[in-house]
Image (cartoon, helix red, strand yellow):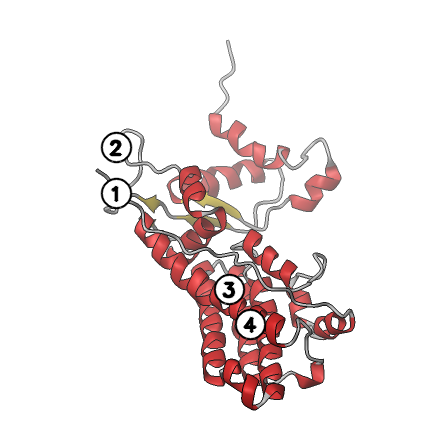
Amino acid sequence: PGHVMYVWVDALTTYMTGVGYGQDEAEYGRYWPADIHMIGKDIVRFHTVYWPAFLMSAGLPLPKQVFGHGFVLARGGEKMSKSAGNSADPLDLAERYGVDQLRYFLLSEIIFGQDGSYSEEAIVTRCNADLANNFGNLTQRVLSMIAKNLDGKLPPMEMVGDVVIYELVKATATVAFPRAFSELGLSNAILGWTRSASECNRYMDTMAPWTLKKTDPETMAKVLATLFICIHDLAITIQPVVPDAAGRILDQMGIPKDERSYRDALDTSWYDRLVQSDFRVASPTGVFPRLEMPAEPG
């Protein structure tokens, strides 16, 4: 008689064979047991009952954690399905609005673990508010003023001014963000980051370096240097969400590609090294274009 193999045995074991089980022990040892299994909520039973049972019966280590995420729902809160004809093509959305922008919207708008809905209007509204008008605007204003009013030259570290805004960014972005990500509070992490960027914009508006340029150029330089450091930390922090745009901002700030980790953001010596290297800030290129509302069908 023929042997029947339960299909989930075959499907689930690919988690381990895919990272070298039975073929490459070094690779397998690096990735297994998994720190977390990220799965859709409709297949929780297979991953939390059958899969651990299979592994235990074979004497193999279990994943350390299983997380069931929710669904992205169609307009009107319905579950997407081909039969209902309400499914969305993420590649179309990414092409229309940008990969980074789509990632930002999904990770910030939907509380991870719950169902969430989307609309093209919501993508445009969220990305314009948080990326183009908030962080993008901050970056453009600060880098432009340094390029234009300081001849692109960064003030020395001892001239860096207000530590209150800098410490705020450090606490709410560089420290709190990775902690929230490790706890899978993705939208909370991004909310804290967005608020930090808003505070930096508020600080810039309050200090008005464009006015200080005429009355107190030294304080203007301090304000711009402080904000340059804040932007550095904010750009490093948001890399997991908008990697391409954050990378292009850090490129324009002269930050080497191997100095963009959270550890680098916590170590303030990078600024001194950048000043000593005689790096000059050039007139910046925007990385968050304003998105346009989708055209009405018809």
Q: Earlier in the sequence, mark 4 or mark 1?
A: 1
| Identity of the residue furthest to the left in this view | 298
Report the disc number at residue 167.
Answer: none
Lateral position of residue 230 relative to residue 271, left or right: left
- At x 68% / y 63%, what residue is drawn? 254
| Secondary structure of residue under mark 1 | loop
| Residue 155 percent location from the top left of the image | 68, 79
Report the disc number at residue 84.
Answer: 2
Per the image, the residue denoted by label 4 is 142
Q: Quadrant of residue 78?
A: top left
Per the image, the residue denoted by label 3 is 180
Q: Earlier in the sequence, mark 2 or mark 3?
A: 2
The amino acid type of the residue labelled 1 equals Glu
Give the number of callouts.
Answer: 4
| Residue 28 percent location from the top left of the image | 69, 40
Q: Nearer the viewer, mark 2 or mark 3?
A: 2
| Secondary structure of residue under mark 4 | helix
| Secondary structure of residue under mark 3 | helix
